């Protein structure tokens, strides 16, 4: 901003330099500082907080806390356009090196308790499991895991199917845990309505 004061035979010019930073998630922490302090908040590495790129809507939040003391979170990034076939699922705040896989269904739900688990299952009905080649994951040292999904081959108990425009699919993540003995847990869930 420039501020100008005019007096007879004099001109005073003051420049006010204002520095602004992004705070896309509205938590009063500047995004560059948030990213520097926790790289797991930008799993796709594009310099933007994953929270600010989400598609779909999260539900069943927060999940039941896992052995880290945190509730596992699921985010979906990309595009809801079926033709783009660009959806990436990300889980975070899980135990390090925990094996697990994504689940999906056309029907949201809430089941608790679940046999052999401390978590709540947020999908029901015909539940498909992402257990094909390369789909069973292990979280990294920060407790995150990432999977790009094929919208032309969403798993169901009867075999893979294609997502269709105006369909809503629901996703969650099952993972192993030790809390304090061997068990399992789930993240929260995401609903995606495709275009």
Image (tube, grey):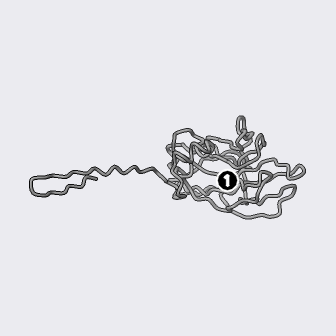
When the figure is inspected, residue 84 is found, relative to residue 188, above or below; the finding is above
Q: Is residue 37 left or right of residue 180?
A: left
When the figure is inspected, residue 169 is found, relative to residue 148, above or below; the finding is below
Q: How many marks?
A: 1
| Extreme residue in the left direction | 9
Q: Residue at x 61, y 59 (%)?
A: 58
Q: Is residue 15 left or right of residue 89?
A: left
* Crowd band around label 1 with a 10 angstrom C-alpha radius: few (<14), some (14–19), many (20+): many
Frontmost residue, 39 versus 177: 39
| Extreme residue in the right direction | 181
Secondary element type, mark 1: strand
The picture places residue 136, in percent across and down from the top left corner, at 74, 40
Frontmost residue, 25 versus 83: 25
Kindly identify which residue carries mark 1.
Answer: 73
| Extreme residue in the front direction | 9
Q: Residue at x 65, y 52 (%)?
A: 74
The picture places residue 134, in percent across and down from the top left corner, at 71, 35
The part of the image, by quadrant, that contains residue 138 is top right
Q: Is residue 57 left or right of residue 125?
A: left
Frontmost residue, 41 versus 30: 30
The picture places residue 25, in percent across and down from the top left corner, at 52, 56
The picture places residue 65, in percent across and down from the top left corner, at 76, 57
Q: Is residue 192 left or right of residue 107?
A: left
């Amino acid at each position: 901003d420039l501020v100008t004061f005019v007096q007879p035979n004099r001109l005073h010019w003051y420049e006010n330099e204002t520095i602004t930073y992004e705070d896309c998630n509205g938590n009063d922490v500047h995004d560059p500082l948030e990213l520097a302090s926790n790289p797991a908040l930008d799993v796709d590495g594009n310099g933007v907080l994953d929270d600010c790129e989400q598609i779909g809507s999260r539900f069943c939040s927060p999940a039941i806390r896992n052995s880290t003391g945190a509730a596992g979170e699921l985010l979906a990034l990309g595009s809801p356009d079926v033709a783009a076939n660009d959806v990436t699922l990300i889980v975070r705040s899980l135990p390090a090196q925990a094996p697990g896989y994504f689940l999906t269904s056309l029907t949201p739900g809430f089941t608790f308790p679940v046999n052999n688990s401390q978590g709540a299952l947020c999908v029901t009905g015909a539940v498909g499991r992402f257990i094909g080649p390369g789909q069973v994951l292990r979280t990294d040292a920060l407790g995150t895991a990432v999977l790009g999904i094929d919208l032309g081959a969403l798993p169901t108990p009867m075999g893979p199917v294609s997502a269709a425009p105006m369909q809503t699919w629901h996703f969650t993540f099952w993972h192993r845990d030790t809390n304090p003995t061997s068990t399992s847990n789930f993240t929260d869930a995401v609903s995606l309505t495709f275009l």
